[in-house]
Image (cartoon, grey):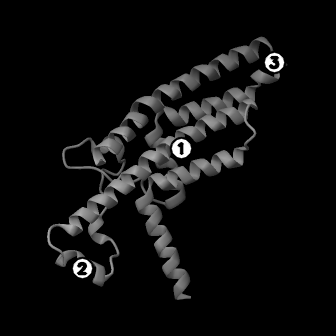
Amino acid sequence: MEELFTNLYLLCANYIAGFLGALMMFIAIFKLVEHGKNPNDPRNKLSVALVIMIGGALLSNVNSSISMFTATLTNNVGHCFVVYQEGEKVEEINPNGGNCYDQDGADLSPEMLKKLEEKEGKSLEVMKKRVRILFTCFSAIGLIYFIKAVFLLKAVAEGSSSTTYGKVLTMMIFSTLVMDMNNTMSIILETVKQSTAL
């Protein structure tokens, strides 16, 4: 299951997003040419071409775009893709070399940790694997929604969607936070701890 979501993420990030980014760049160039031919046509405004070009740039290297959003929102080096093994292409997914996720540092209550260790078999290992699968699933879904948000940005610029730039930006921010679930959960837990300490 981990492999399925990891491969889905790699497929979307490396091939689909890159192809769609190049396609958006060509559409932007076409819009610029049409604007040069007829500057009074409202469908081919200069602002539309520029927004589509920004969307194409975001998709051309989607891992860097997501890392930029993550660094801005969480003050980390980049997003943390959970599933990685020794010898895999870690640098391709994680800008920080895959040293961002530590399951051993998870805040398990002593009672739960004791129960998991006492059970026969490898209950703790099974739980860790399920958490990794869950976080990997979140990363893949977040990536798909990030790509969707970039295309909504294009639709808003062209005027073919009833949504607003604010909704698109919100969708990009939350999809980035979902992709970086490890750091997002740490921020939420720290916020709750600080707010209950008051």
Q: Nearer the viewer, mark 3 or mark 2?
A: 2
C-alpha separation, residue under disc 3 versus residue under disc 2: 70 Å
Query: Which mark identifies residue 70?
Result: none
Query: Which mark identifies residue 145?
Result: 1
Q: Tell which circle, 3 or 1, labels the residue nearer the N-terminal end.
A: 3
Q: Residue at x 57, y 24 (%)?
A: 25
Q: Nearer the viewer, mark 3 or mark 1?
A: 1
Q: Tell which circle, 3 or 2, labels the residue nearer the N-terminal end.
A: 3
Front-lying residue, 57 or 130: 130
C-alpha separation, residue under disc 3 versus residue under disc 1: 33 Å
The picture places residue 98, in percent across and down from the top left corner, at: 30, 52
Mark 2: amino acid: Lys
Please determine whether, in this image, residue 95 is positioned above or below residue 54.
below
* Total tally of numbered discs in the picture: 3
- Quadrant of the snapshot with the C terminus: bottom right
Q: Tell which circle, 2 or 1, labels the residue nearer the N-terminal end.
A: 2
The picture places residue 76, in percent across and down from the top left corner, at: 44, 58
- When asked about the image quadrant of residue 48, the answer is top right
Q: For mark 2, what is the residue?
A: 115
User: In this view, which residue lies farthest toward the front?
Assistant: 120
* Residue 91 located left or right of residue 176: left
Whether residue 65 is visible to the viewer of this picture, yes or no, is yes
The picture places residue 121, in percent across and down from the top left corner, at: 14, 68
Front-lying residue, 49 or 124: 124
Q: Residue at x 46, y 48 (%)?
A: 67
Please determine whether, in this image, residue 96 is positioned above or below residue 60.
below
Query: Which mark identifies residue 39?
Result: 3
C-alpha separation, residue under disc 2 versus residue under disc 1: 37 Å
Mark 1: amino acid: Tyr
User: Element at badge 1?
Assistant: helix
